[in-house]
Image: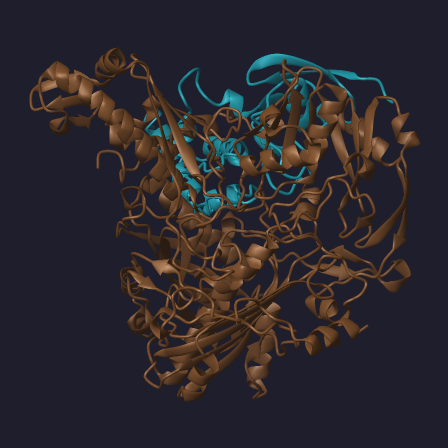
Chain colours: A brown, B cyan
């Protein structure tokens, strides 16, 4: 490897440190107008009337839009097209947009918002999953599956109950993971304009320009070929810019009506309302284990608080149960899930999408198992670790697993064996592991086309331009693209110009989500690069009179022994021989072995693994938690640029620790005399606590290289996986420090104090959920695991989840 | 509506004048009236530090400062940090060492760090942490930022050994 694995300045590094990176709100166009959205102050209400007359006649106002202007719904998932750009009849959370004003400047637009009179009829609000279960009516959405339960899922891979019965121990534990939000420093912004041909261009801070493109065509009812979506570099995404957004539709519509560029930039409060962040999840784990520590089976139930719309929720809910099997061998597994609608900002994907919540529970429960059985927590994990090249109980195909080496390294570097359980009171170590996808195996809408593609254009100057739909969200996708092409062609990454994230200029890449970019774009880049390399080699070989397969491409030269050409000369010869040199490469992940309905969530070309040890100190007087050091080892397959890879790991540790200790998107009810409505407790950065530079621990990052054959040069993801083990490792470290279990996030000082008080009083030294409400889970889809004669299909007659008529009746009659 | 105001100030060492509505913040005038979009906004409430610039050499949150207060003062933004075409040592260290991921908080942190290094040639890690504690970064976990500031301090000391 000439380029990969060596620390380098990222190809877009200079622009980022000179202020030249052009984010969406930095775009200024001649004659540009500004849009602001009027958002609902009520969490649930019927819109009786909207009077926009005064706003329309306000000086400087050009246009006012309401729900009437948007008859068509949208949604990121084909099954939940449940949002309108502007709500026409019902608002479902505080912040749901109801009108848009376009004016000569932001100030005028903001003033005009106050002149719009909306008459609302207040509806009862649902604030929590419990309330959603208790109140099937009124329904937040008519399409929900049962009352206010948006979606029910149930799968059984082998008879878990009989496994649990035969187990030496069954551990039953409840956990709760509070919701939290992405908090990218850049607020969402979009600029729309009509080009000279009368076609629409939208520049937007989005992680998914392809899906925005499709949605705009649907909502605006114009041909997709007349729309160009340019994803500007995102000022942080973390999943918060993965959804298709109201403001993108509204600003595009306004431009089409006015024939002038229009910009919208959300303010920080609005970003909290847009949300699409981590779902709050209540979990119940029942796990069987033999007395020597082998897991026998697991039954996981999750109850997921979805907020007011579908967003990615159906997928997020599947993800609360999909990946339990890829880390440890589970001979049998059962998973029930329910997502409910509540009158809060919609939840969606945040770094780790649906998997950090159950990972938190799973890894704490393993800690409890290890303690009860007297087995070292690292040994327990190694004993149960999935074997490489396995198919899991739920039919996920797993290739390489570098977890054993990850565990070995963090245990050694932290001196875990000699310090765990031996540190003085108030200090402790906690260990946890995690696993994540390297890209979702299936696209969001069903199709058999490539999920990523790279187009290369070369010319006689030696210039290489790479076109790809992938989106730079800070993770370094442009750098990965340039590095992989440079490695194949033997040139410097800075010689490559990246044109990315533009549906009008670049081939489709589905987006920067599910940690898919390195693997999918990378494989497509290798495909395209190999094709041009073959042409160049053929032409150069003729000139140098050697066989093309003997030619090497390195350091900007094409050579064999002492016969050599500069790369540009070789491209010139190829241009002579073949005409203009270019190629396309594309990638589609292999199909997973699961054939049952529901098998679409979880498959991935590869899985990354992480092990983490956290050292924590707890002040028993105040409950204050200090984390001085974290050791983390990530199974990265192969490192493309160690500077960026380390940044992804440390950024994940930061975000995970911040979620563990303080981040929470929470709500409160106003007093009854003030309507009793449900409002956001803290829609500001000051009150939404996150770690600052002063709170960061020392981090010892280890990258474990075990190249995966499905990945480009073996490289796996690194952007999300390293977050997963951090939260449970913190909880486990606190237990080691002061002997209390905090089974819910965030772990705040008051919870620690409360648990310490219980401990002192001889009660169970634990803070966490104590009750899992009865949820009308359906009878499961039954899928025999591979070792029980399964073929990946559901058993005949058990291929759909079934809600018995009694359950259906019982849960719709409670009012 | 109050009439626009004319304000004269120095921006990145050059005289500048702007004619703007009196309610505008320095951040808005820099971005909207002087076309210096390198300075970012993340909250416009003084919470995130993305908009930090130097006013008479001291870090200030430009979203909390009315532009009219800047009459006659010297403002420095990220656009003025490089020395011609050559990057300032802070910029090159940030680019080389992974201190800028998405790059959105970067201009504010660069300017804050510049003020720190002008006061202290060899700040400790704790001093660096303290100096940038008002600048939120969601990408990096801060460690590579600390290292880049330390590296820049080294490069600056090498330039001016005393």
Image quarter (top left, top right, bottom left or bottom right) of the C terminus of chain A: bottom right
Q: Is residue B24 left or right of residue B81?
A: right
**On the rendered structure, is A474 left or right of A662?**
left
Can you name the residue that lies furthest to the left here? A562
Of A491 and B79, which appears nearest the observer?
Answer: A491
Q: Could you tell me if residue A385 is visible in this image?
A: yes
Residue A696 appears in the figure? no
- State the image quarter where residue A163 is shown: bottom left
Say left or right for B20 vs B146: right
In the image, residue A607 sits, relative to residue A462, either above or below, namely: below
Residue A529: x percent and y percent?
Answer: 30, 29
Image quarter in which the N terminus of chain A is found: top left
Number of callouts: 0
Q: Nearer the viewer, residue A672 or B18?
A: A672
**x and y percent of residue A677 in the render?**
82, 58
Residue A517, image quadrant: top left
Judging depth in this view, the residue of A379 and A331 nearest the camera is A331
Q: Nearer the viewer, residue A607 or A480?
A: A607
Q: Is residue B137 above or below residue B12?
A: below
Q: Give coordinates of residue A667: x percent, y percent.
A: 72, 59
């Amino acid at each position: 490897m000439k380029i990969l694995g060596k620390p380098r300045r990222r190809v877009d590094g200079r622009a980022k440190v000179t202020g030249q990176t052009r984010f969406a709100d930095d775009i200024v166009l001649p004659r540009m107008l500004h849009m602001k959205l009027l958002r609902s102050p009520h969490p649930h209400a019927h819109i009786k009337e909207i009077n926009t007359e005064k706003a329309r006649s306000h000086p400087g106002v050009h246009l006012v839009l309401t729900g009437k202007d948007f008859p068509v719904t949208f949604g990121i998932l084909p099954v939940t097209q449940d949002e309108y750009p502007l709500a026409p009849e019902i608002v479902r959370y505080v912040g749901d947009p109801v009108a848009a004003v376009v004016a000569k400047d932001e100030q005028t637009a903001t003033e005009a918002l106050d002149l719009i009179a909306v008459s609302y009829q207040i509806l009862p609000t649902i604030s929590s999953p419990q309330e959603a279960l208790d109140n099937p009516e009124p329904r937040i959405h008519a399409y929900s599956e049962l009352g206010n339960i948006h979606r029910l899922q149930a799968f059984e891979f082998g008879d878990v109950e009989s496994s649990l019965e035969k187990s030496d121990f069954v551990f039953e534990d409840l956990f709760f993971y509070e919701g939290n939000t992405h908090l990218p420093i850049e607020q969402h912004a979009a600029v729309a304009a009509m080009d000279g041909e009368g076609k629409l261009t939208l520049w937007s801070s989005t992680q998914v320009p392809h899906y925005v493109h499709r949605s705009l065509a649907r909502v605006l009812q114009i041909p997709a070929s007349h729309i160009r979506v340019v994803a500007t570099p995102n000022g942080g995404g973390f999943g918060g810019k993965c959804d298709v957004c109201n403001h993108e539709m509204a600003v595009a519509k306004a431009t089409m009506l006015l024939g002038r560029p229009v910009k919208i930039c959300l303010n920080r409060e609005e970003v909290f309302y847009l949300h699409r962040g981590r779902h709050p999840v209540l979990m119940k784990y029942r796990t069987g284990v033999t007395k020597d520590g082998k897991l026998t089976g697991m039954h996981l139930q999750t109850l997921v608080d979805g907020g007011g719309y579908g967003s990615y929720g159906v997928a997020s809910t599947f993800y609360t149960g999909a990946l339990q099997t890829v880390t440890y061998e589970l001979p049998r597994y059962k998973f029930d899930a329910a997502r409910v609608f509540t009158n809060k900002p919609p939840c969606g994907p945040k770094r780790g999408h649906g998997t950090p919540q159950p990972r938190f529970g799973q890894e704490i429960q393993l800690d409890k198992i290890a303690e009860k059985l007297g087995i070292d927590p690292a040994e327990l994990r190694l004993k149960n670790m999935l074997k490489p090249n396995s198919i899991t109980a739920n039919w996920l195909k797993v290739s390489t697993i570098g977890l054993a080496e990850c565990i070995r390294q963090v245990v050694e570097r932290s001196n875990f064996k000699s310090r765990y359980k031996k540190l003085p009171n108030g200090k402790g170590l906690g260990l946890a592991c995690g696993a994540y996808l390297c890209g979702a195996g299936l696209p969001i809408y069903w199709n058999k086309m490539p999920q990523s593609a790279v187009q290369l254009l070369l010319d006689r100057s030696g210039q290489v331009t790479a076109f790809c739909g992938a989106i730079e969200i800070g993770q370094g996708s442009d750098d990965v693209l340039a590095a992989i092409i440079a490695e194949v062609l033997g040139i410097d990454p800075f010689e490559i110009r990246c044109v990315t994230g533009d549906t009008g200029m670049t081939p489709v890449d589905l987006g920067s989500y599910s940690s898919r970019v390195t693997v999918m774009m990378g494989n497509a880049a290798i495909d395209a690069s190999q094709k041009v390399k073959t042409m160049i080699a053929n032409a150069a070989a003729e000139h140098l009179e050697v066989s093309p397969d003997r030619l090497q491409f390195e350091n900007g030269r094409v050579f064999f022994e002492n016969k050599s050409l500069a790369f540009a000369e070789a491209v010139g010869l190829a241009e002579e021989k073949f005409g203009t040199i270019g190629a396309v490469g594309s990638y589609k992940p292999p199909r997973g072995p699961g054939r049952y309905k529901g098998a679409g969530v979880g498959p991935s070309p590869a899985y990354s693994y992480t092990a983490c040890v956290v050292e924590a100190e707890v002040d028993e007087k105040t409950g204050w938690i200090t984390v001085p050091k974290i050791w983390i080892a990530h199974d990265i397959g192969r490192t493309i640029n160690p500077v960026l890879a380390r940044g992804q790991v440390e950024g994940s540790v930061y975000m995970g620790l911040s979620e563990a200790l303080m981040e929470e998107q929470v709500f409160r009810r106003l007093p009854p005399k003030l309507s009793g409505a449900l409002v956001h407790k803290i829609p500001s950065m000051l009150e939404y606590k996150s770690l600052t530079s002063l709170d960061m621990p020392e981090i010892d990052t280890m990258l474990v290289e075990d190249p995966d054959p499905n990945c480009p040069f073996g490289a796996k993801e690194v952007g999300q996986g390293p977050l997963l083990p951090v939260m449970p490792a913190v909880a486990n470290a606190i237990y080691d420090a002061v002997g209390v279990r905090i089974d819910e996030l965030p772990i705040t000082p008051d919870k620690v104090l409360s648990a310490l008080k219980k401990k002192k009083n001889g009660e169970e030294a634990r803070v966490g959920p104590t009750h899992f409400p009865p949820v009308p889970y359906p009878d499961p889809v039954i899928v025999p695991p591979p070792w029980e004669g399964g073929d990946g299909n559901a058993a005949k007659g058990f291929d759909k989840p079934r809600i018995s008529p009694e359950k259906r009746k019982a849960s719709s009659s409670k009012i | 509506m109050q009439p626009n105001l004319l304000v004269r100030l120095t921006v990145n060492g050059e005289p500048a004048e702007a004619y703007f509505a009196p309610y505008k913040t320095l951040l808005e005038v820099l971005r909207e009236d002087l076309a210096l979009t390198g300075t970012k906004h993340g909250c416009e409430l003084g919470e995130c530090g993305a908009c930090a610039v130097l006013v008479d050499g001291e870090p200030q949150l430009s979203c909390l400062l009315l532009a009219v207060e800047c009459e006659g003062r010297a403002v420095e933004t990220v656009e003025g940090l490089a020395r011609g075409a050559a990057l300032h040592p802070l910029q090159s260290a940030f680019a080389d060492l992974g201190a800028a991921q998405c790059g959105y908080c970067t201009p504010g942190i660069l300017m804050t760090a510049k003020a720190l290094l002008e006061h202290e040639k060899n700040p400790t890690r704790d001093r660096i942490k303290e100096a940038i504690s008002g600048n939120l970064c969601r990408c990096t976990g801060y460690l590579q930022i600390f290292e880049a500031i330390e590296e820049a301090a080294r490069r600056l000391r090498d330039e001016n050994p005393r």
